[in-house]
Image (cartoon, rainbow, N blue to C red):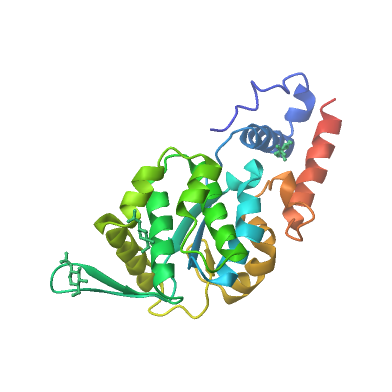
């Protein structure tokens, strides 16, 4: 939705608007200001994370990189997040119709993957879902000997769907959801080479993948279109066009006084 520059807030400066370049420029500025005030970004960056519930690198990526960025509203509105919890597992359909899984870090990881897949499917609040996963992953980093902190985290985050998640994770629904995670992973890559694998804009890039492990925000900011949120400044991703935009906007404001 472009604001009409003629009827916009700058009609008091008709002489300046007579110049066609200035005209287009003020129009751009008005449109950009309007866009920065809307809540959901029109074109969020698709971010897909292929990970495993017991993989130490996956846990570190989630709790140190992804989750903190998702807590910043001005950044999370720019992310279309897809979490695929499966990693280097395998699955096969048995003759009796059941799924059989072999997980990278053993049986408990299969269960952890199912709990997370079930949480993604059962929980309606995105923020609670992200907080629940954060608690689960953190719990396994703190104590790798427990089965899985399904209950403890449900209580800690105070989620309403606790019973559904437990039922799902121990039942056929959990199996079906984990098998779907497997299909999505294998469609992306027959065998993952590293876990977690982080993909921006639906296109794997080895450099992004490696940088995202320690500077997820910086890689994300590279993909957020201009004008980038203030939170991207200083992350090494502020583009020349953003700086140019700010300078030109300042000049424009000066002339419109
Ligand atoms: C299917 O077979 C597997 C392996 O023999 C077994 O563990 C599983 O419980 C069976 N599923 C059903 C629904 O009978
Ligand atoms: C669900 O499965 C987990 C992992 O196998 C097990 O430890 C737990 O006791 C089961 N929970 C219920 C309610 O059956
Ligand atoms: C979000 O970004 C806008 C524009 O850069 C800024 O004005 C606003 O203060 C930011 N909001 C928060 C909560 O940081």
- Viewer can see residue 127: no
Q: Quadrant of the C terminus?
A: top right
User: Could you say which quadrant of the image residue 41 lies in?
Assistant: top right
Residue 74 lies, with reference to residue 33, above or below; the image says below
Residue at 60% across, 27% down: 4
Residue at 59% across, 33% down: 38
**In which quadrant of this rendering is ligand 3 seen?**
top right
Residue 97 lies, with reference to residue 256, above or below; the image says below
Residue 225 pos. (x, y %): 62, 51
Q: Nearer the viewer, residue 155 or 202?
A: 155
Q: Is residue 45 left or right of residue 86?
A: right
Residue 44 pos. (x, y %): 53, 49
Q: Nearer the viewer, residue 36 or 183?
A: 183
Q: Is residue 108 left or right of residue 244?
A: left
Residue at 53% across, 33% down: 1
Q: Nearer the viewer, residue 154 or 114?
A: 154
Residue 226 pos. (x, y %): 66, 49
Count the labels in the image: 0
Q: Is residue 21 left or right of residue 208?
A: right
User: Could you say which quadrant of the image residue 32 lies in?
Assistant: top right
Residue occupying the far left of the picture: 96
Residue 25 pos. (x, y %): 71, 38
Residue 14 lies, with reference to residue 33, above or below; the image says above
Residue 232 lies, with reference to residue 5, above or below; the image says below
Q: Nearer the viewer, residue 76 or 249?
A: 76
- Viewer can see residue 8: yes
């Amino acid at each position: 939705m472009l604001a009409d520059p003629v009827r916009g807030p700058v009609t008091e400066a008709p002489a300046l608007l007579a110049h066609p370049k200035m005209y287009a420029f003020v129009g751009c500025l008005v449109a950009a200001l309007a866009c920065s005030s809307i809540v959901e970004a029109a074109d969020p960056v698709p971010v897909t994370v292929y990970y495993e519930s017991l993989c130490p690198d996956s846990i570190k990526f989630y709790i140190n990189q992804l989750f903190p960025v998702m807590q910043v509203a001005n950044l999370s509105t720019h992310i279309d997040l897809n979490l695929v919890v499966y990693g280097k597992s395998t699955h096969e359909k048995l003759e009796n119709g059941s799924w059989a899984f072999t997980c990278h870090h053993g049986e408990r990881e299969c269960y952890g993957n199912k709990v997370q897949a079930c949480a993604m499917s059962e929980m309606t609040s995105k923020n609670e879902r992200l907080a629940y996963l954060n608690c689960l992953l953190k719990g396994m980093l703190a104590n790798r000997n427990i089965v899985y902190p399904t209950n403890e985290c449900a209580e800690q985050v105070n989620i309403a769907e606790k019973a559904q998640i437990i039922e799902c994770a121990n039942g056929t629904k959990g199996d079906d959801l984990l098998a779907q995670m497997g299909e999505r992973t294998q469609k992306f890559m027959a065998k993952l080479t590293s876990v977690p694998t982080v993909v921006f804009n639906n296109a794997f890039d080895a450099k992004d993948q490696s940088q995202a492990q320690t500077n997820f925000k910086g890689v994300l900011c590279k993909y957020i279109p201009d004008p980038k949120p203030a939170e991207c400044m200083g992350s090494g991703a502020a583009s020349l066009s953003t700086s140019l935009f700010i300078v030109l906007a300042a000049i424009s404001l000066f002339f419109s006084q």
